[in-house]
Amino acid sequence: MMIWIRTLQLGVKSLLLHPMRSLLTVLGIFIGVAAVIWLLAISEGISREAQKQIEGLGANNIIVRSIKPPEDSGSSSGGFSGAKPYGLTRADYARLVSTIPTISNALPIREIRSQFSNAGRTLDGRLVGCTPDYDDAMHLKIARGRFIAEADLIRRQTYCVIAAEVAEQLFPGRDALHRKLYLTQSRDYYEIIGILQRRTPTAAIGGSLAAQDFSRDVYIPSTTLQTRIGDFIVRRGSGTFEVEVVELNQITLQVDKVENVMRTSEIVRQTLENHEKTQDTAIITPLELLEQARTTRLMFMVLMGLIAAISLLVGGIGIMNIMLATVTERTREIGIRRALGARRSDIVRQFLVETIVMSGLGGLTGVLVGLAGPWVITTIRDSILLPWAPKLMSQLPDVARNVEPTIVPLSIPLAFGISVFIGVVFGLYPAIRAAKMDPIEALRHE
């Protein structure tokens, strides 16, 4: 044990004789270790954000969406000709609910781009015809008042629930609850019975479920929308108008058990086979997307790890280069030690200890800086990039813009262990080369 302690002391003294060279060698390992931890933390943060978006859809849900066929533009400049109905129908909803026993609940949803106004103020947003279960399915929380009730559907009440931003912009400085909101699409006033808390938007999932922003939504009973607005929607523009004939934009199916989701999804696909020809529907299964996201996460982390490992490899090459130069410089010292009785194993141990000290020190500092990675990344993003490059940040996907880097616990011992391993591997050849020197030739070296 004392031999190793003395060898360590001698190795540290030898490294301190050339502090700048030793520091630059340590820097290579330090960058590699910190890069491993940082890149894995970023990939873990992005993966968790993506999985959170998918989990928000519900692992036991199946989402069926209406998609506008590309051949049917639905727009005209001379009349209503060419307006064809597409997408999900109420008959599809009834057939799914009545024929598939594993479906525990189903939510028919109709969405329309509309304009809302109050006292001369107007706001463009989304009008959603829904059922009482919609708030739970979409994770909406009431700030004041209540959400739509079953009695409102039966009586086709002109009630509405509005998002927080709608209340702030159309009723500034006033309590919007129980006031009247004018819906341009319906050409009628609706009583506000509830105001929602703020809800973060969701990112796009796949190619058939677009990103959803809930900040400008107004919710009314689906039966009221059907009666007062109907399925035939006309949007007028400058010299043109767009026609849309859709009964339901989405049906969210809740399956009784998670293990039945994939089987139920296939049954839903078979039940809606009449839409395959027109290709006006899409079935999104969050559970399937979640499994794909987890697989992608592992692949992404492996890729990031390989990229960071290249930095460690470069650092190892730097150690070998420095140690080979050190062996040449200290040839006479090696000869003197051998002449005084040092064995080859003593010489190997001396040079190995020096490389392990450098790689260990680089690994330790790399771990400390790596642990500060999430704080550094979020500080740079929030304090530098957002104020100074808002346009660039706005072009990034929501997942990348809102990501919170998360340290992967395994990355810390893994990165440190690899740094020490690289120090041993790349320091072994110079140490063996030094030990194999002929003592007489080494003493003659100038």
Image: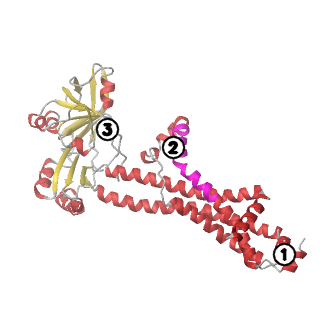
Q: Earlier in the sequence, mark 2 or mark 1?
A: 1
Any magenta on residue 224? Answer: no
SS of the residue under disc 2: helix
Task: Please tell me whether residue 433 is drawn above or below residue 417 in the rendered image.
Answer: below
Q: Relative to 194, is 294 on the left or the right? A: right
- Residue of label 1: 335
Q: Residue at x 73, y 61 (%)?
A: 12
Q: Residue 71 appears at what percent x and percent y?
A: 29, 50
Bounds of the magenta segment: 362-385
Image quarter of the N terminus: bottom right
Q: Residue at x 29, y 45 (%)?
A: 73
Badge 1: few (under 14), some or many (20 or more) residues near its Cα, within 10 Å? Answer: many
Residue toward you, 194 or 392: 194
Any magenta on residue 382? Answer: yes
Q: Amino acid at mark 3?
A: Phe
In front: mark 2 or mark 1? 1
Q: Residue 93 appears at what percent x and percent y?
A: 15, 50
Q: Amino acid at mark 1?
A: Gly
- Residue of label 2: 378
SS of the residue under disc 3: loop
In front: mark 1 or mark 3? 1
Residue toward you, 120 or 28: 28
Labelled pair 2, 1 in contact (Cβ < 8 Å) = no
- Residue of label 3: 214
